[in-house]
Amino acid sequence: MAATTPIASLHVLGSREFGGADQFYVRLVLALREAGRPVTAVNRRGSPVAEALSDSGIEQLHLPLANQWDLWSVLRMRRLLKARAPCVVQTYMGRATRLTRVPAGLPVVHIARLGGFYRIDGYYRHADAWVGNTRAIADYLVREGLRADRVFQIGNFVPERRSFSPVERGERRRLLDILDDARVLFALGRLIEKKGFQDLLEALARLPREISGRSWVMLIAGAGEEGQRLARQAQALGIADRVHWLGWQDPPDPWYDLADLMIVPSRHEPLGNVILEAWNYRRPVLSTQSDGAMELIRDGENGVLVPCAAPAALAAAIERLLASDEAVLAALGEAGHRDLEAHHGKVVVLSAYLDLYDRLMRERLGGG
């Protein structure tokens, strides 16, 4: 293969969800196509990612990619790789990686992309290279015995920022009966235990109804198994009138735009795409000290950090930020946006993946 020939890549994901990894999968394959790179998306028929790419013009191939040992998908993937070689096949999360097996001798590089501290044995060890989207994940992969020279850190990028008019913002406030001068707090995520919404509600119950003469409301976007329990908790804490449950929002951009402060209460978060998304809108971020947040946020410079599962500390930080000068909040948001552009911008992340594909394929083909 000539050095100037673009490397074709196949991107394989077996999820039926539309979480952070799934959304990044969609963004990356779209970016590769925009860059003129041959790209094929392999996923499950009817899945959210398949629907999201349905009108994109990107070639999609559908496999069952079942949870159990799916021999049919394994064999179909082998035939696909033989037909498309030379190429890069990039897999996302455990299921797709476990079912992707490159036949010996093929000029195909298998890259496994991980967004969490997942079990390696039985899922990831057979890949040729591994990408962690944080430094902590990349270090974890090396500690698990994967080749250090084949472990790479490449972060995520977020969608392009959308523009909203003052009229649109006003309509959203009226939709929820939010007073014109009320401060808007925003949180986003699956309503499950590790996201820490139970701690956020406890923190909100500790706040006065007004801070520096202004009321506040909490907007929570997301869905999940804890939804009803969390709503009952808000009712029991006496804050149900100040908490708005928005449900699943796709895209959530209008709510980032409306927010005065983004709160990330997670007890466990490998990266925290919501931090990057908030920075995309220059919004100040208050987060717990999860792994991802600790890697992204420099406390007091581009955000504020508090301990995980500590409602009192979270409440104190919210009250302090809402009582601070507007310039303080704006400076935190601007600093976050600068970091986003420098380290998590679309051009930066896409270039890192393209360089990795080209390098690994040159090595595989004996070109250096």
Image (cartoon, grey):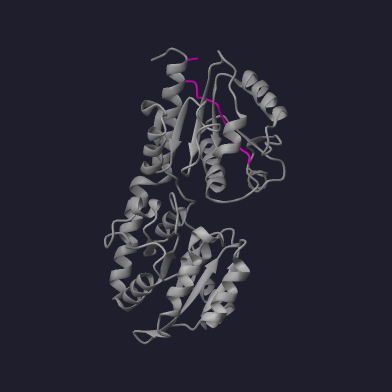
Q: Residue 113 location in percent, x, y?
A: 49, 36
Q: Is residue 25 left or right of residue 350?
A: right
Quadrant location, the C terminus: top left
Q: Is residue 47 left or right of residue 197?
A: right
Residue nearer the viewer, 364 or 270: 270
Q: Is residue 5 magenta?
A: yes
Q: Main secondary structure of the magenta part?
A: loop
In the rendered image, is residue 3 in sight?
no
Q: Is residue 333 left or right of residue 236?
A: left
Q: 164 above or below 171? A: above
Q: Residue 284 location in percent, x, y?
A: 36, 65
In the rendered image, is residue 226 in sight?
yes
Q: Residue 296 location in percent, x, y?
A: 35, 52
Q: Which residue sits at x=61%, y=61%?
A: 224
Q: How many marks?
A: 0
Which residue is the extreme one toward the bottom? 213
Q: 271 above or below 34? A: below
Q: Which residue sits at x=49%, y=51%?
A: 159
Q: Which residue sits at x=60%, y=35%?
A: 96
Q: Residue 287 location in percent, x, y?
A: 39, 62
Q: Is residue 237 magenta?
A: no
Q: 82 above or below 256? A: above
Q: Quadrant of residue 177?
A: bottom right
Q: Which residue sits at x=39%, y=38%?
A: 138
Q: Which residues are magenta?
A: 1-14
